[in-house]
Amino acid sequence: FLNWGLFTEEIYKDPKSFPLREIAGGASNKNYLFKHEGKSYFIRFAPETATLLGADIEIENEVLRKLQGLSIAPKPVYYNPEKRILVTEYIDHEEGK
């Protein structure tokens, strides 16, 4: 069991102390790939300024939750609207395919 709330708080404070791979993309988000017990997770920290750019992490979370039943989007596993943190399962893929 991983307490995502506490874990993401610690990552936010000092991401370099964790085995994370930063994923590029987004104008202001901080995105990471994290592997735990054989599973991969996508962790997104979306600053308040992302809303000014037209991005809304709350809408992203809602859409992903609705799509998870169709197996066409990653499943959200943790969402903190106050801190603007979203964790989803990471869909492993091969580059160039």
Image (cartoon, grey):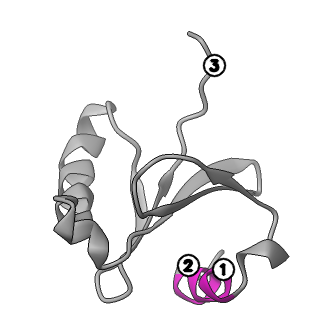
Say left or right for 21 vs 69. Answer: right
In three-dimensional space, the C-alpha distance between marks 1 and 2, rounded to whole angstroms, equals 10 Å
Q: Nearer the viewer, mark 2 or mark 3?
A: 3
**Crowding near the residue tagged with mark 1, few <14, some 14–19, many ≥20 C-alpha atoms within 10 Å:** some
Q: Which residue in the protein does label 1 denote?
A: 11
Q: Residue at x 67, y 87 (%)?
A: 10
Q: Nearer the viewer, residue 6 or 96?
A: 96
Q: Residue at x 37, y 76 (%)?
A: 47
Q: Is residue 58 visible?
A: no
Upstream in the sequence, badge 2 or badge 3?
A: 2
Q: Residue at x 60, y 83 (%)?
A: 12
Q: Nearer the viewer, residue 42 or 21?
A: 21
Q: Check residue 57 for magenta coloring.
A: no
Task: Label 1: state its secondary structure.
Answer: helix
Query: Type of residue at label 1?
Result: Ile
Upstream in the sequence, badge 1 or badge 3?
A: 1
Q: Which residue in the protein does label 3 denote?
A: 95
- Residue 82 in the image: x percent, y percent? 31, 89
Read off the magenta span.
5-13
- Residue 62 in the image: x percent, y percent? 18, 59
